[in-house]
Image: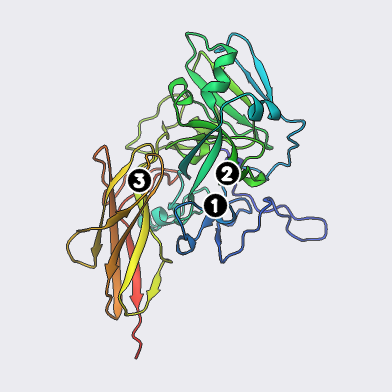
Amino acid sequence: MSGPLRGSEPDHPSPDGVRERKVVKPTPPELMEDAGTGLDYGIRPDRAPGYITPIDRFFLRSHAPTPHLDAARWSLRIEGSGVREPITYTYADLWDHFPLISMVRTIECAGNRRVLFGEEYERKFEGTQWGRGAISTAEWTGVRLRDLLEPAGITPKAREVMPEALDEIQARRPMPLAKALADDTLLALAMNGETLPLDHGYPARVVVSGWLGAASIKWVGRIEVSEHPLHVPWNTEDYVLIGPDYPPQAPSLGMPITGIPVASLVELSWPARLRPVPQVIRGRAFAGENQVTAVEYRLDEGSWQEASLAPPEIPGAWVRWQFSWDPQPGDHIIRVRATDDQGHTQPDTVPWNELGYCYHPVLSHPIRVESTT
């Protein structure tokens, strides 16, 4: 396995011994969870105030330090066997010559909840040690990817499209042509109404709705359109499900991950401490390319009950849910399960895979309710 892909190396020390930051924005512990790589920071589930994740706490996942790119000298090159004529766009071209659209979409890392996966199997997986915070939602504004590809003349045999980053390791991951041409596959220039921040892909990044976060390449400088399958470490060695339940798809070591499975998140710390007073328990649920249609909860050994869903309910984005609870002092367990519009419900367990990806079963969230006496 290629170690640098996982961003698990320690921060580079500077000559005076002070740790150099690999990201630009502040990542204070009261807002973000440090995954220990110097590159990767998750949201704190108990610090998610609204439907849209503020930029200051939107999770960070990178394979190399944030590059500092100059938009005035930046360009986007579209080329490969799947286009008739390569084409290059400037930053101004994107703003001035194409329709801009905005869409709300959630991005989740396939390794989200890897630490909890490891606890279930009593082992530590390689890769970023995510708890529950490798997921966030933003309003993305930019140009549909198909509007940029079509002027290059897509050939009849074109089958895959691969954005490539301008970071140190040229992060890249292919997708089928149909996904690249979808209405909600975007080359984003802005995030939550602001110019795309450096850490989140400035000058431009791809947003691939409903797919694992690794597909939404940041700092894009090149897009290859190919008439042949494209194989890179990000779909053969990493970001693949490897294990007895996942037959290899040569040359991949396993099953390349595409869409994200349905899962839910409780907006409490882990473990949580509550007071014995009536309160509202809240959370989020996300189903990748699909739409969450129902969320149920279970208190201790009680029966499953339906939680209330709050608008908006958008395919490709999370949905908020809530229920009221009058907890009694003592130790409790909250379990939550979500169901999507394709009939997929969170399972009780998921098969083991070598890299600890796509862990999405019903979780037993520990709660201690402390007496006021």
Residue identified by numbered label 2:
191
Between residues 125 and 256, which one lies in front from this camera angle?
A: 256
| Amino acid under disc 3 | Glu
Residue 122 against residue 89 in the figure, above or below: below
Which residue is painted at 56% across and 19% down in the image? 149
What residue does disc 1 label? 58
Above or below for 301 versus 178? below
According to the picture, the residue beneath numbered tag 3 turns out to be 313
Residue 62 location (% of width, % of height): 60, 44
- Of the residues tagged 2 and 1, which is closer to the observer? 2
Q: Quadrant of the C terminus?
A: bottom left
Mark 1, other Cα within 10 Å: few <14 / some 14–19 / many ≥20:
many
Q: Quadrant of residue 341?
A: top left
Say whether marks 2 and 1 touch (CB < 8 Å): yes
Q: Quadrant of the N terminus?
A: top right
Residue situated furthest right in the rendering = 15
Q: In this view of the protein, which residue sits in the foreground, 317 or 64?
A: 317
Report whether 199 appears left or right of 182: right
Task: Name the residue: 59% across, 57% down.
Answer: 36
Percent position (x, y) of residue 329? 29, 81
Q: Quadrant of residue 321?
A: bottom left
